[in-house]
Image: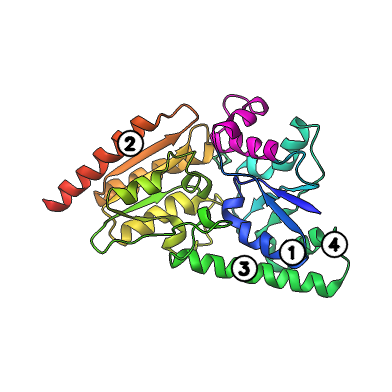
Amino acid sequence: MRIGVPRALSFYRFHPTWAAFFNCLGIELVVSPPTNRATLEAGLPYAVAETCLPMKLFYGHIRALVGQVDQLLVPSIQRLAPGSSNCARLIGLPDLLRATMPDLPPLIAPDIDLSQGLAALMSVILEAGALFTLNPLALRDAVAAAWSAYRSSRQAMMEGRLTPASFDRPTNVVSWLPDGLPIAVVGHPYNLYDPFINHQLLTRLARLGVNVLTPERLGPQPADDYWAFEYELVGAARLALERGVKGLIAVVAFGCGPDAILVDEVQRLSGERGVPLMTLVLDEHSGEAGLVTRLEAFVDMLHWRKGR
Ligand code: SF4
């Protein structure tokens, strides 16, 4: 039994959790290859033009797995905290796929709603596991392994020992220069950690002598945000400003409704503190050369301000 996992969207939040769960049940997970131009081209026919780039890439990753696996893991992430709401596209992922791709293998599509408490989450996970075994002890062990992997991966990311980019492959994780320029890069993990989507933004910043702070490094998410992923932009920007970063980069996707609202708040926060902000809007037409020029100019300006 091989279960396919698209390297997109919730992969960058929950992969260690699902990997621990299924590995404990002896099931092989197959992650789609890293994103490239072919991934985008494979996804484009399934999305209307206004769809955000992360969704187009998600479709492309699904296409890379069709024919290679027996089932696909596509959770519907509904709420991450009581009272919060999630992007409709992320809630409706399984339905969107079923409506657009008739040749899919069966979907494993649990509803993840953390507002119902841990017990409800565990029952959803058990339901997913029951598709593969009815042995209660094996399921209990798999749930325990998943929970432990979730907690330890969050901790490791906060300490800079792990990033979502290295969830399934050891890469150089966070480098920290003793006299590096501290800049926060805020946004959703699928926008920050997929080097194709952002033209290797984090690597380029590291090469420019920047110590990058991302939302995962800044601390646990407060429970009172309205949007489930609000923390990744506004909450992280607020924490980073309190920690005295010298600049902020907000990474948002063109066509993303929640980001369009939240980036205004990031702008207000950085304006209040007098900290320069650069907003990068990602779509499939953004050019690498333009990004590099903007980044270099932004970092030069921050060095100049620091020297002054
Ligand atoms: S939150 Fe925004 S970028 Fe993410 S899937 Fe929804 S619309 Fe796309």
Q: Is residue 102 above or below residue 244?
A: above
Callout 2 amino acid? Val
Mark in the foreground, 1 or 2: 2
Of the pair 220 and 53, the residue shown nearer to us: 53
Question: Residue placed at 49% from the left, 32% from the top?
Answer: 254
Residue 292 pos. (x, y %): 33, 36
Mark in the foreground, 3 or 1: 3
Tell me which corner region of the image, top left, top right, bottom left or bottom right, holds residue 173: bottom left
Question: Residue placed at 75% from the left, 73% from the top?
Answer: 141
Looking at the rendering, the quadrant in which ligand 1 lies is top right
Q: Is residue 123 left or right of residue 32?
A: right
Of the pair 87 and 205, the residue shown nearer to us: 205
Residue 130: mark? 4
Mark closest to the chain's N terminus, 1 or 2? 1
Q: Disc 1 versus disc 2: distance between alpha carbons? A: 46 Å
Q: Disc 4 versus disc 1: distance between alpha carbons? A: 15 Å
Mark 3 highlights which residue?
149
Q: Is residue 1 above or below residue 100?
A: below
**Label 1 beta carbon less than 8 Å to ligand 1:** no
Q: Disc 3 versus disc 1: distance between alpha carbons? A: 18 Å
Q: Disc 2 versus disc 4: distance between alpha carbons? A: 49 Å
Residue 120: mark? 1
Mark in the foreground, 4 or 1: 4
Mark 2 highlights which residue?
292
